[in-house]
Image: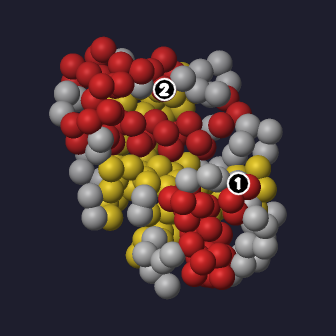
Amino acid sequence: MPVVKRLQISDRSTLLMWKITEGEQALLELSGFSGIVSELASHPQKRKEFLAVRALLRSAGFADDPSYDKNGKPYLPSSALSISHCFPFVGVLLSMDEVGLDIQDFSPVLRKIRKKFMSSSEMDEFPDDRSCLLIWSAKEAVFKKYSDAHLFFERDMTVTRIDDNSIHIRVEHPMIQCEEVCSVDWVDDHAVVYCT
């Protein structure tokens, strides 16, 4: 099984990542999924990601498929859950608390759309591509953690600092005012950003 990362973040949170190298049929068998996958996703890559998440959960001892709340946030009966995928990787962050996870590699598209998720002051302070990638991923992770609040990336979240292994974000929203510190890790050229 290609579990490429297993990180015990705390006694309450665990990060697991899988690198997809299998074909769809092998993933179907590993996942134990009994539905019709082609009805869920028409693109073969999306079907593999769907099945790999379930295979990853099975490898961690979870028999249940994720359920989704009214905002589309996944959860398990016994655990909060955040899911991310950026082919060929999928990841799950399991916790007793609300969490957010994002896996992303750099794409020139991020540079083109940065005005949609970065303020002008963030663009001035963090102009490089690496920072652009990390800001996107950190804001995505925070968005997932607080999905009930429907945060706006550019308006409600401000990056205050980027270190080697963390990103600090100030969240200012009518429902949430806090300072989040997202952890940063790398697998191959993919940023793995999570907040617990």
Mark 2 is on which residue type?
Phe
Residue identifier under label 2: 153
Q: Is residue 39 above or below residue 145?
A: below
Q: Is residue 101 left or right of residue 164?
A: right
Q: Kindly identify the residue that appears in the image at 41 percent across and 42 percent down.
A: 137
Q: Quadrant of residue 161?
A: top left
- Asked whether the viewer can see residue 131, the reply is no
Secondary-structure class at tag 1 = loop
Q: Is residue 156 visible?
A: yes
**Residue denoted by label 1:** 40
- Left or right: where 14 falls relative to 74: left
Helix or strand or loop: what does disc 2 sit on? helix
Task: Judge depth for marks 1 and 2 and give the one in front.
Answer: 1
Does residue 160 sit above or below 140 in this rendering? above
Q: Is residue 124 left or right of residue 120?
A: left
Amino acid at pointer 1:
Leu
* Circles 1 and 2 in contact, beta carbons < 8 Å: no
Dot 1 alpha-carbon crowd within 10 angstroms: few under 14, some 14 to 19, many 20 or more:
few
Horizontal side, residue 121 vs residue 8: left or right: left
- In the rendering, at what x and y percent does residue 69 appear? 79, 45
Residue at image position (54%, 23%) is 152
Residue 172 percent coordinates (x, y): 54, 22
Q: Earlier in the sequence, mark 1 or mark 2?
A: 1
Question: Any mark on residue 49, and which?
Answer: none
| Residue count near mark 2 (Cα–Cα under 10 Å), binned few <14, some 14–19, many ≥20 | many
- Separation (CA) of disc 1 from disc 2: 28 Å
Q: Residue at x 54, y 60 (%)?
A: 44
